[in-house]
């Protein structure tokens, strides 16, 4: 088998940057990517034969761990029945029912093929329902690569955004209003400025794309109140937190009902699935029952539905509280090792997600704080940890994902690797 180095060289001839998604290229952590030959449970094995404890877990989908036998079995049963129909199938109905049952704020859900499609479609629906154009998003939150969300503010609390990437016309992002995460006053100011033209506020109810930044007490409740008062829709982007923060997502964990919810990752069990849903009065606006168009050749794909159904079935029988307790202990053990070595870090943990921030700050609550962390130190740590057999997120602005398949031995191996890497 070709080595990672050989494959990366070849990949760069045919694929931009040699990868099909930028963060995988490991540019921000100063090394070339490993190419994966296989994965099982909490581990990946590179084409070079190195087995690593994996805390990327495909960026979130693998809450059961890689190649879970129930998911594998479901796929092996589904494949001989055909890989795509372009016509409805029973599995789509069953998965929709299970998603709606898990999320009380949802009456209906539409399957798509990625989180990007989910958030793009939810925003379109919110704009149609309200007849308004503007959307509030939080700096450092990531909602996929639809144009409206690739805005990056200059700076400041409430900023009209400028295109965050070439190819996004200014006209597209002029309706994207940016404010710091956890800054409820900043959102209030935006509503004072634009109240009758804000279609939606979209938020990661626990931010996972600037490292893990939990919501401050009252933040999500405040967004709920503001959206209700101004007739705007509150969109919870639960692409990461859906079925991870709890089986019913962050909204069930914190008891707040958004108007629309977007999902992805876990509900596909590793196959390409996204979804968006909400109250029937909104969702019925989606074609063909309504006039808001959204479509997809592979939406509701039978293999993806089978993997999603198998995943949710196992999750319903899984002990989230026990996993959370294990991850909490693991995070405390990590803190102890860094303290032992005299390396200042802040470690955030929520449910089975964690991030190690290299910083001497004591509180991190938004992207401004995160930007002051030492990304270079994280990069050096990443490289040493990978050499010591642990695959962390190849970016200082991502979140570690623990699965039900990670063992105490994996945690012990990781702590030992940290000791060697500091
Ligand atoms: P996808 O289009 O990548 O399926 O989902 C976009 C998305 C939407 N919302 C949230 C909260 C997300 O975290 C994501 C995608 N997450 C990133 C990593 N945090 C995907 C990794 C990548 O881009 O390769």
Image (cartoon, helix red, strand yellow):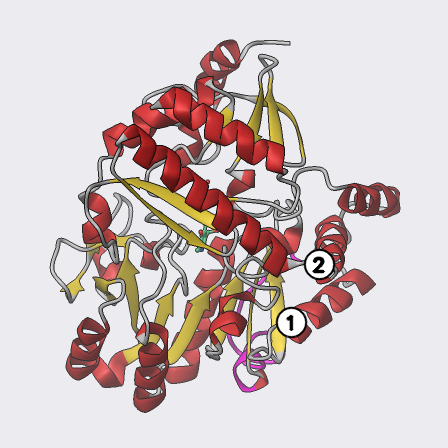
Instruction: Specify which label sits upstream in the sequence, 1 or 2.
Output: 1
Mark 1: give few (<14), some (14-19) or many (20+) Cα within 10 Å. Answer: some
Return the residue nearer the eye: 10 or 87.
Answer: 10
Q: Position of residue 393 (x, y in %)?
A: 43, 36
| Farthest-out residue, front | 340
| Farthest-out residue, bottom | 229
**Res. 102 mark:** 1
213 vs 332, left or right, is left
* Residue at 37 percent of width and 68 percent of height: 202
* Residue at 31 percent of width and 90 percent of height: 229
* Residue at 36 percent of width and 87 percent of height: 228
124 vs 379, left or right, is right
> Over which residues does the magenta segment extend?
281-299
Q: Quick check: 404 above or below 242?
A: above
Q: Is most of the magenta stretch helix, strand or loop? A: loop
**Visible residue check, residue 163:** no
Q: Position of residue 7 (x, y in %)?
A: 52, 14
The answer to which quarter of the image holds residue 21 is top left
Q: Quick check: 193 above or below 386?
A: below
Q: Quick check: 103 above or below 161?
A: below
267 vs 310, left or right, is left
User: Does 145 lie within the magenta span?
Assistant: no
**Res. 10 mark:** none
The quarter of the rendered structure image containing the N terminus is: top right
Q: Position of residue 267 (x, y in %)?
A: 63, 56
The answer to which quarter of the image holds residue 178 is bottom left
Q: Quick check: 105 above or below 22?
A: below
**Res. 312 mark:** 2
**Visible residue check, residue 119:** yes
């Amino acid at each position: 088998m070709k080595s990672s180095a050989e494959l990366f060289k070849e990949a760069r001839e045919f694929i931009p940057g040699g990868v099909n998604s930028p963060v995988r290229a490991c540019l921000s952590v100063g090394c070339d990517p490993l190419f994966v030959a296989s994965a099982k449970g909490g581990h990946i094995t590179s084409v070079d034969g190195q087995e690593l404890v994996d805390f990327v877990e495909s960026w979130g989908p693998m809450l059961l761990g890689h190649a879970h036998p129930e998911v594998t079995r479901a796929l092996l049963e589904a494949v001989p029945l055909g890989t795509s129909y372009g016509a409805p199938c029973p599995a789509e109905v069953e998965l929709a029912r299970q998603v709606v049952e898990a999320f009380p704020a949802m009456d209906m859900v539409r399957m798509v093929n990625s989180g990007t499609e989910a958030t793009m479609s939810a925003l379109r629906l919110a704009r149609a329902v309200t007849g308004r154009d503007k959307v509030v998003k939080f700096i450092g939150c990531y909602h996929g690569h639809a144009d409206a969300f690739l805005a990056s503010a200059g700076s400041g609390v409430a900023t009209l955004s400028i295109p965050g990437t070439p190819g996004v016309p200014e006209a597209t992002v002029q309706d994207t209003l940016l404010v710091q995460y956890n800054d409820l006053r900043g959102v209030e100011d935006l509503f004072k400025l634009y109240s009758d033209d804000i279609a939606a506020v979209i938020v990661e109810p626990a931010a996972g794309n600037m490292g893990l930044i939990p919501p401050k007490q009252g933040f999500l409740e405040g967004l709920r109140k503001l959206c209700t008062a101004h007739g705007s829709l509150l969109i919870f982007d639960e692409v990461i937190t859906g079925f991870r923060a709890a089986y019913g997502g962050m909204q069930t964990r914190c008891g707040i009902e958004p108007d629309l919810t977007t999902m992805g990752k876990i509900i596909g069990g590793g196959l390409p699935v996204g979804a968006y849903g909400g109250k029937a009065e909104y969702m019925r606006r989606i074609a063909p029952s309504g006039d808001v168009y959204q479509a997809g050749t592979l939406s509701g794909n039978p293999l993806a539905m089978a993997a999603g159904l198998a995943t949710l079935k196992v999750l319903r029988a899984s002990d989230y509280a026990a996993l959370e307790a294990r991850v909490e202990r693991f995070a405390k053990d990590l803190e102890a090792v860094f303290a032992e070595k005299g390396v200042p870090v802040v470690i955030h943990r929520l449910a089975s997600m964690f991030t190690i921030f290299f910083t001497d700050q004591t509180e991190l609550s938004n992207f401004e704080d995160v930007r002051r962390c030492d990304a270079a130190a994280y990069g050096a740590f990443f490289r040493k940890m990978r050499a010591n057999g642990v695959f962390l997120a190849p970016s200082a602005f991502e979140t570690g994902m623990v699965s039900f398949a990670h063992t105490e031995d994996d945690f012990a191996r990781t702590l030992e690797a940290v000791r060697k890497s500091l």
